[in-house]
Image (tube, rainbow, N blue to C red):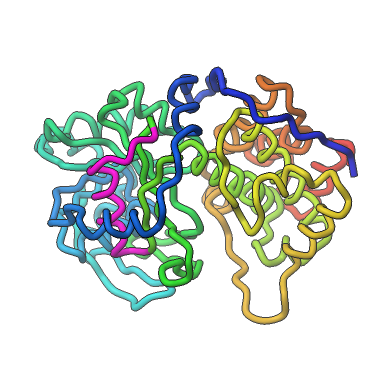
Amino acid sequence: MSSRSCSAPTRATSTATTSSSTAVSAETSSAACRASPRSRADETISLRRADTMGKKLLFVGAGAIGSYLGAFLSRAGHDVTLVDPWADQVETIRERGISVTGPHEPFEARPAAIHVHEAARLPRDYAIAFVAMKVYDTPWATQLALRHLAPDGYVVAAQNCWPDPVVAAIAGASRAVGLVMSKIGVALWKPGRVERGLERGQGKGHDVFRAGEHDGRVTPRATALAAMLSVIDGAQVTDNLWGERWAKLCANAMGNPVQAMSGLGSLEIASSEVGRTITIHLAAESARVGLALGYRVPKFNGAEAGEWAGADRRETYDALDRMLTPASGKAVNWRASMAQDVAKGRPTEIDAMNGFVVAQGRERGVPTPVSSAVVEVMHEVEHGILKQAPQNIEVVLRRAGL
């Protein structure tokens, strides 16, 4: 194993611009890092007092996450409209609604569904517009959402990667709220049928939804958003959006591309030594970069950010390896979003995920050899140079010098 040092947390000056991300100011990120944590009791009180009356909601994106959230919120009494470029999905929802399955009672919901080319006729009175497209679609999706907001409405980035600066640049920071979703695991393999593959966190000490303002303030609208989402699963308002967002980025970066390049599911990867090796190195690199940027990165995927960052120490690595090794019993062999994209022949979010980690590491002088090799291999898989195969994990490790 190669030795990687963890740079001391420093005040972030900026984040590098990528095809799907724009700079986050030092004032914004450092304010979020300085904000003091609120107690769970205070959050619970705030959630109970929040405005959770029926709202008019727009989802730009009726894929897995948009359909799952939209179906639940429609069933809860909100006026939900889904807009999507996938014609079969829109027509199926119109005809039969959305069928939802998962670790809860199955149900069907019938939100309104609109083709993208029909969106111009939508009214401009939506209280909240969720952008639920792939991160590379954020600019146009945000512009569409913004056109149909009520004067006091706002846009929610319900996405992976680092979409919030893009949303803020288009809608304005005052009309943008971030939403981090941790361990929700949804998939849409057929039109009108969305499934959740991971257990619910509600009642088990895990809040799936973390809603937060870009500047770290705890506002009534962020609190109300968390309260609204609590009908789906555990939810909280956070004063640490950037730290939460980076933790989710780490969780995605350590798993999504490994599944996507290998064709293996989460259980199969965790059950192999080479699968755990690449997973630990990807988590370590991502954690080191986030800490070097000065973010207050919370615990993700079973360990503190500092533990992942310290995986160059043998005893720490061994402890992480033991933690990732599946115990006997029931476990889900899940395919994450990037693996689903490869299976469907769609472009992946690799540049905005691991590519973003690499770019930020370069800015802060943090080496990311495994992440860099992952980006290269995923590009080759996407372009047909490499076939999706378990051997691609070894290809990455060799290119990274491991």
Query: Does residue 269 appear in the picture of this structure?
Result: yes
Which quadrant of the structure image shows residue 126?
top left
300 in magenta: no
Q: Nearer the viewer, residue 333 or 309?
A: 309
Residue at position x 43%, y 43% in the image? 159
Q: Is 16 located above or below residue 267 in the figure?
A: above
Q: Is residue 358 left or right of residue 2?
A: left
Q: Residue furthest bottom?
A: 329
231 in magenta: yes
Residue at position x 14%, y 33% in the image? 152
- Classify the position of the C terminus by image quarter: top right
Q: Is residue 82 left or right of residue 13?
A: left
Q: Residue 208 at what x, y percent from top left?
A: 44, 58
Q: Nearer the viewer, residue 132 or 152?
A: 152
Residue at position x 71%, y 30% in the image? 8
Q: Residue 359 at what x, y percent from top left?
A: 64, 25
Q: Residue 258 at what x, y percent from top left?
A: 69, 50
Q: Nearer the viewer, residue 267 or 222?
A: 222
What are the residue bounds of the magenta stretch?
A: 216-233
Query: Does residue 385 appear in the picture of this structure?
Result: no
Q: Residue 60 at what x, y percent from top left?
A: 29, 42
Q: Is residue 178 left or right of residue 15?
A: left
Which quadrant of the structure image shows residue 73?
bottom left
Residue at position x 60%, y 49% in the image? 251
Q: Is 270 located above or below residue 60 in the figure?
A: below
Q: Is residue 22 left or right of residue 212?
A: right
